[in-house]
Every structure is written in C-alpha cells, then in structure tokens.
Amino acid sequence: MATVLAALTPATAFAESPAASSVDEPLRVYAQQQLHWERCDVGQPAALECAKVKVPLDYGAPSGRTIDIAVSRVKAGSAKDRHGVLLMNPGGPGDPGLTMPVDMETVLAPEVRARFDLIGFDPRGVGRSSPVACDLTEAERSFQHPYAAGTFAKDVEWARTVADKCRAKAGDVLPYITTRNTARDMDVVRAALGEKRISYFGYSYGTYLGAVYTQMFPQRADRFVLDSAVDPTLAWRGVFRGWSEAAELAFTRWTEWAAARDTTYHLGATGAQVRQTYWALIARADRTPVPTTGGTLTGDAIRSTYAAFVQPAEVTPWIVALKASAEGGPAAPALETGSLSDNAAAVAWSVFCGDTRSWPRDPEQYRRDAVRDRATRPLAGDLGANIQPCAFWKPALEPATVVDNDVNALIVQNQWDPKTPLAMAQGMRRALHGSRLLTVTGGEGHGVVVNGPSCVDPTVTRYLTTGRLPATDGTCGG
C-alpha cells in the first residue's frame, strides 16, 4: 500500500487543464462534485456558509471508502476585485478550522477580504469532517511526561496503552489521517471550488500542512502565508525535542529580565541568582508539592510550564507566588494550560505518528535520549525526548515529505515563540527557497497575524493583494 500511495504524485492525481475541475481518472468524480452551500449555524453570521466535500479515505484506492470534509466560506467582498480563494488552517494538528473565515475577518485587512473567498475547513478526522476518537482519558491525552528511572516503565505503558486504544477504536481510519492526505484533500477542495490555484494562510502546524501542499502540488500554490512555522526537517520527533532547546534560551532571557527587576520581584540580583532561586523552588516542590488554586504542583509539573518563560512580564509574578506558597504563604494562582479533547488527541497522534517512519521503536532509545537531553537542557529536555505512543503505532504508510521547492511564501515569526521557535521558522525558510522570512524582533508568544495587530500586517496585506514578496528577509518591531 505504501508503494501505491507514494506513486500517487500530483501529476497523476490532478493533471493541469483549462478547466479547474478537470482531473485524470479515477479522481474526476471528486473534483466534479457539486457543493451545496447553506448557513453553517444559527449562532454564526449568515455570511458564513458550509458544505461537505467527499474525498477518498485512501487515495491509493480512490474508488473505495469515502469520508466527508466540512468546508466553509465567506465570499469575497468585491466581485470586481476578487482574486481567488484563501484556504486557512488553525494548527494543531487536530484543531477545527470551520469558523476561520469569521475568526480571521478581524485580523485580515479589508483589501484582502475584498479579494478572496475565505475558506475554512475541518481537516480529515477533525470536528465535522468524519471525526475520529480513541476514547482516551484526560491523563492519556497528556503529551508531556518527565523522565525518571522509577517511572519510566509507567511511561512506556502509557504510550503503549494510547496506541492500543487508538488502534482498537479507529485502526481502520487512523493510518490515513496524515498531513499528506490532508494536503490531497485541500486539492480536491480546490478542484470542487472550480479554482486552478489556491492561496493559503496556515498557523503553527498549519504552516507544515501548507509546506507539504507546496511540495505535492507546486503548480497549484499561489500566495502562501505561514504564521509561526515548523521546520519540515524536524517532523515530528525533532519538533518535540526542539522545544527544549528554545526553552533554555527563553529561560536564560527570563533570569536576566527578573534580575534587572530584583527590587520588585526579589528573585535575585543576577541571572545566576534568579536561576538558583528557580531550581531551589523546583527541588522544594519535588519534596513537598506547592499549593495552587488548581491543586498542588510538583517540581516536574512546574517545569512543564516552561513555555511561559517567553513572556517574562507575565510569568514572573506567578513564579513569585509559587515561591511564597512553597514557603507557607497563600496558594498561588493556577496557571491555565488547557487540555486536548479526545478527538484532537486522536488526530494529533495519527498525524505525528503517521507522517513519518522515523520514530524509534525501542523504548530504550527514548530512555537514553531523555537522560541525555535532560543533562544538556535541564529545564525541559526530558519532556520532549521521553517515550511517545508513536513507538507502538502502526508503521506509517508513506515516508515523511521532504520539503524542498521554490514556491513563493511569506513566513512571519515572533523572535520568542515557545511552540514553533525562531530556529524552526528559519528551517522552513531554508526548505522553501522562494520564501521570505519576516521576524518580529522581541515578539513574544505563539502566533503573529492571528494575535494581531502586528508590524508584519502591512507586508502580509501587500503580499496577499499583489503577490509581491519583500526583496529580502527582514525584521520589524523591537
């Protein structure tokens, strides 16, 4: 099956034709389907229309089982100035995108909204697109497991249990919930909409999905904006381990920031002293968990909030409150961390494990990596390197996509991003030779355009409305 799938190249899947929906058999029936648009929900604006697109579950057997892809749109504001369609993905993997045409209206310039039909969709397996589930408990949906020799056997059992439960619940579908197949779905949507090319806005994981689309269907890619980008060469174990590298940089920056404000926070007058204060807190919490309004936190639980260090002004008062609580003061406030739904977790593991064949299968490899990464990156090294369900997942049907092309794209990135660090965006820039990278100097947090307004907005607007990229990579803000 893997050989059949690998042979299904863009050229054989969707041949170039004057008619946008014209494709070679046996996918013609999908490209020529008629979409029936209707209002999405009573609670949504009337302008947001929804439809279902039929796609093959397995593109290697397109005459077999089908699934539905839920799509939405807000039509371009100007029929005269309309350029085409702008597909959008909110990340995850596993996040629904059906409301993105409404969500993005507030951050996209009026001239962009005038030129594009804004197209949202729930990726395969997500939300209203033939959703999948694994029946995982909340604990089983957790991604981060600190390594300790005494608990590693439990971590292995957790990883095996997640893989087994997903296989038992949806083993006939999950192997096909992959980025490559979602990219193929996007091209079916393109054809069903009657478009020769698509423009695209992808956020977080959506940047990787967009990059895969440009690799598989370069002739179909028009104007692509990638917000907070994943390095395609790291998909996916390298992404997990790369988080801890960025965490150390952000942590060092935080210690210096807090030290410069010692008269306010009293964590230490130098970066070294602040670092010592933090690790003393971690050691104390490992002995006696620290009370918070959301429950007690061990040292490992506090370490797992490492992403917060990219925003020093927000995280420092919380560290101060934790320290006071550990010393007998009032309970510190709980830090909102969020949790995945069962649907989101099922899709996430399917994508992470099914996109690539590079996950180690030997639990001892994860143990060695966790020990090594914790030694070199003590804040979070073990959290990203420890064992994951992919060690026991069914082997991927296709190899990972090698992204290496000249398609135009605009990558926008915060300097201090905990989930897709700047180094990952730079990796995306290297993979997309025709792209430009615009970095927000001093920018904090995950997401640029989506959390606007931002200094990148004029460049994004100019690119989407004219197709012209900046002459070189650049920075803004500061």
Image (cartoon, helix red, strand yellow):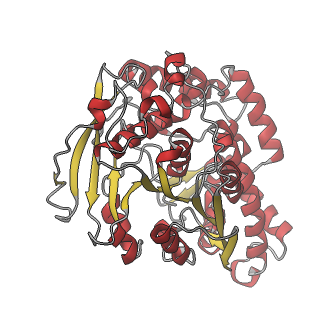
User: Residue 282 appears at what percent x and percent y?
Assistant: 71, 54
- Identify which residue, 403 or 207, lies in the foreground: 403
Residue 136 position by quadrant: top left
- Identify which residue, 123 or 9, lies in the foreground: 9
* Relative to 54, residue 467 above or below: below
Q: Quadrant of the C terminus?
A: bottom right
User: Residue 286 appears at what percent x and percent y?
Assistant: 68, 47
Q: Is residue 70 left or right of residue 220?
A: left
Residue 131 position by quadrant: top left
Residue at position x 69%, y 71% in the image: 474
* Relative to 440, residue 88 above or below: above
Q: Is residue 111 left or right of residue 194?
A: right
User: Residue 58 appears at what percent x and percent y?
Assistant: 39, 24
Q: Is residue 450 left or right of residue 381?
A: left
- Identify which residue, 119 or 9, lies in the foreground: 9
Furthest residue toward bottom: 263
Residue at position x 51%, y 30% in the image: 9
Furthest residue toward front: 18
Q: Is residue 84 visible?
A: yes
Residue at position x 26%, y 69% in the image: 79
Residue at position x 55%, y 30% in the image: 353
User: Residue 201 appears at what percent x and percent y?
Assistant: 46, 58
* Relative to 308, residue 375 above or below: above
